[in-house]
Image (cartoon, rainbow, N blue to C red):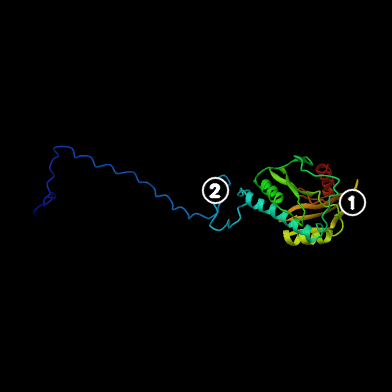
């Protein structure tokens, strides 16, 4: 019996005469970041500020606590719209049908402060003033001003050119015109009429675009005026404010 050599046929291993060069280092594996979701239009950014508006408007409503974009233009437009609607309504109520014929006994001016509020002199207030100084309403010129700190609290309009006005007569017609031209709603049950020291005043609570307020008119000899108070819809408080305004503007 022959014995096979177990190493027969195997390649001969040659002794190494030197070290093999080290393998080139492999770059570390960088994990692939997850794909970011597509941006959501009008989603709030970090810090609570909303993203830039989409074309054509804000679209979705920001979540509670998110900062809303400034609305100076819309507020300005609303204020001017309120005043124009008020003037139209005064004409509809017949207030300016009888212009005074030189029998004035009082003159009016707008002081720098009324009812604890400073007169505003920003772009909106200037626009309002210029509009009224260059216009006549039913042949009557009105002085107008905004009062408040940062935002209007009072809108005041007054003239000393009409001694024939009665604040109480035609007030219902005035309110009908005011609500139809300003999108305001009034609380008929809140109406109050009063006479204080020769000043006749009529007031009513109202709301314009969700903003509560009062609208009041007064007459005092040859002086007639209107006040919109955007701080409260309490018509009795509006009565007090209007009395204070009437005394402040007339000399």
Q: How dense is the environment of label 1, judged by Cα within 10 Å: few (below 14), some, or many (20 and up)? A: some
Estimate the x, y position of residue 161 in percent, counting from the top left. 81, 50
Quarter that holds the N terminus: bottom left
Estimate the x, y position of residue 223 in percent, counting from the top left. 83, 49
Give the residue at x 66% y 48%.
127
Count all numbered tags in the image, as a single digit.
2
Is residue 7 toward the left or the right of residue 102 in the image? left
Residue holding disc 1: 194
The residue tagged with tag 1: helix, strand or loop? Answer: strand
Residue 45 is labelled as 2
Is residue 167 toward the left or the right of residue 230 in the image? right
Quarter that holds the C terminus: top right
Note whether residue 216 is visible. yes
Q: Nearer the viewer, mark 2 or mark 1?
A: 1
Q: Would you place residue 92 above or below residue 7 in this image?
A: below
Estimate the x, y position of residue 56 in percent, counting from the top left. 55, 58
Is residue 126 toward the left or the right of residue 178 in the image? left
Name the foreground residue: 196 vs 131.
131
Give the residue at x 12% y 46%.
12
């Amino acid at each position: 019996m022959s014995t096979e050599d177990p190493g027969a046929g195997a390649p001969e291993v040659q002794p190494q005469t030197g070290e093999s060069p080290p393998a080139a280092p492999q770059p570390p594996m960088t994990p692939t970041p997850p794909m970011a979701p597509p941006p959501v239009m009008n989603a709030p950014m970090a810090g609570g500020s909303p993203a830039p508006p989409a074309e054509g408007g804000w679209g979705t409503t920001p979540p509670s606590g998110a900062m809303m974009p400034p609305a100076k233009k819309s507020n300005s437009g609303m204020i001017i719209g309120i005043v124009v609607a008020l003037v139209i309504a005064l004409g509809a109520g017949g207030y300016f049908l009888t212009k005074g014929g030189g029998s004035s006994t009082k003159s009016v001016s707008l002081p720098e402060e009324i009812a604890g509020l400073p007169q505003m002199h920003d772009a909106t207030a200037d626009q309002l003033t210029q509009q009224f100084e260059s216009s006549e309403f039913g042949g009557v010129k009105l002085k107008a001003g905004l009062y408040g700190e940062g935002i209007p609290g009072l809108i005041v309009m007054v003239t000393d050119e009409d001694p024939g006005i009665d604040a109480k007569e035609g007030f219902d017609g005035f309110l009908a015109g005011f609500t139809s031209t300003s999108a305001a709603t009034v609380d008929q049950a809140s109406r109050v009429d009063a006479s204080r020291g020769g000043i006749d005043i009529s007031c009513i609570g109202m709301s314009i675009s969700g903003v509560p307020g009062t609208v009041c008119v007064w007459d005092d000899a040859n002086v007639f005026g209107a006040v919109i108070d955007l701080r409260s819809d309490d018509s009795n408080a509006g009565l007090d404010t209007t009395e204070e305004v009437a005394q402040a503007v007339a000399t």
